[in-house]
Image (cartoon, rainbow, N blue to C red):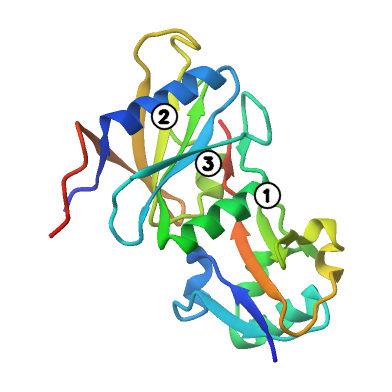
């Protein structure tokens, strides 16, 4: 068993074009480290200064991780993780 | 091939109406279409969670719902639009820095001239890829060309 991670278009350069990859980890930060090991460079696009980047959303089983512990959010085998960049801007 | 956004009149009008309605706050939304088709077919107005005249952001829960719906329908965001309410319809540094759909047409509507009232608006479209902005022509057609075979 593993954790499926849905990768947004803009980060597929790190996954060889794959829309979804699998990873493992007991927490979101462990999962991101595992992703980084297989897809070098992806971590920097998700994490900045030890925290989740402000304009990147990560969901675990449809819940925004900001509401369930952020990088410390606990994960289990079979969880569905989705990464979506914010759609945002301003004048 | 020169970049161009081809959009139907009804969708164009609906984006403009949304921008005027939400003025002086920025309005935002997308037009989804079948993956790889470059056809903006299904307008989805989004709530500006920032509720601001100078910033827009999709609510994170609504963003996930939107993408799940598009994935279920084999769609992608063909157009990502928002309005500028006091400045020209050109991507700001923030817009460029946060643009994360390299395949999308980024539409900017400026309501600075007439606000909520009738009257022309600036309606311009751009590609934003890796921080590079390329303006493209906007072609408004009565209906999108029929591609059924």
Q: Position of residue B80 (x, y in %)?
A: 45, 43
Disc 2 packing (10 Å; few <14; some 14–19; many ≥20): many
Q: Is residue A29 above or below residue A62?
A: below
Residue position marked by numbered label 2 in the rendering: B15
Whether residue B130 is visible, yes or no, is yes
Mark 2 chain: B
**Residue at 51% across, 54% down:** B100
**Residue at 35% across, 25% down:** B13
* C-alpha span from label 1 to label 3: 18 Å
| B48 displayed left or right of B16 | right
Residue position marked by numbered label 3 in the rendering: B95
Tags 2 and 1 both on a single chain: yes
Residue position marked by numbered label 1 in the rendering: B60
Give the quadrant of residue A84: bottom right
* C-alpha span from label 2 to label 3: 18 Å
- Comes first in the chain, label 1 or label 3: 1
């Amino acid at each position: 068993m593993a954790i499926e991670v849905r990768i947004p278009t803009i980060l597929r350069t790190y996954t060889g074009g794959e829309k979804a990859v699998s990873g493992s980890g007991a927490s979101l930060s462990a999962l991101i480290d595992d992703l980084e090991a297989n897809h070098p460079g992806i971590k920097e696009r998700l994490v900045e200064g030890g925290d989740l980047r402000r304009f990147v959303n990560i969901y675990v089983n449809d819940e925004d991780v900001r509401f369930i512990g952020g990088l410390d959010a606990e994960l289990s085998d079979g969880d569905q993780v989705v990464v979506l960049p914010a759609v945002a801007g301003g004048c | 091939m020169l970049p161009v956004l081809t959009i139907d009149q009804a969708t164009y009008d609906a984006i403009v109406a949304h921008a005027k309605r939400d003025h002086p706050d920025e309005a935002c939304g997308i037009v989804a279409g079948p993956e790889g088709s470059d056809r903006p077919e299904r307008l989805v107005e989004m709530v500006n969670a920032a509720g601001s005249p100078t910033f827009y952001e999709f609510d994170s829960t609504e963003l996930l719902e939107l993408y799940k719906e598009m994935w279920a329908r084999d769609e992608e965001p063909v157009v990502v639009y928002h309005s500028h309410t006091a400045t020209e319809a050109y991507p700001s540094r923030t817009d460029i820095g946060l643009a994360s759909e390299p395949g999308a047409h980024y539409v900017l509507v400026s309501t600075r001239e007439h606000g909520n009232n009738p009257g022309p608006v600036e309606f311009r479209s751009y590609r934003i890829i890796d921080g590079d902005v390329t303006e493209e022509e906007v072609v408004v057609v009565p209906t999108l060309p029929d591609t059924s075979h």
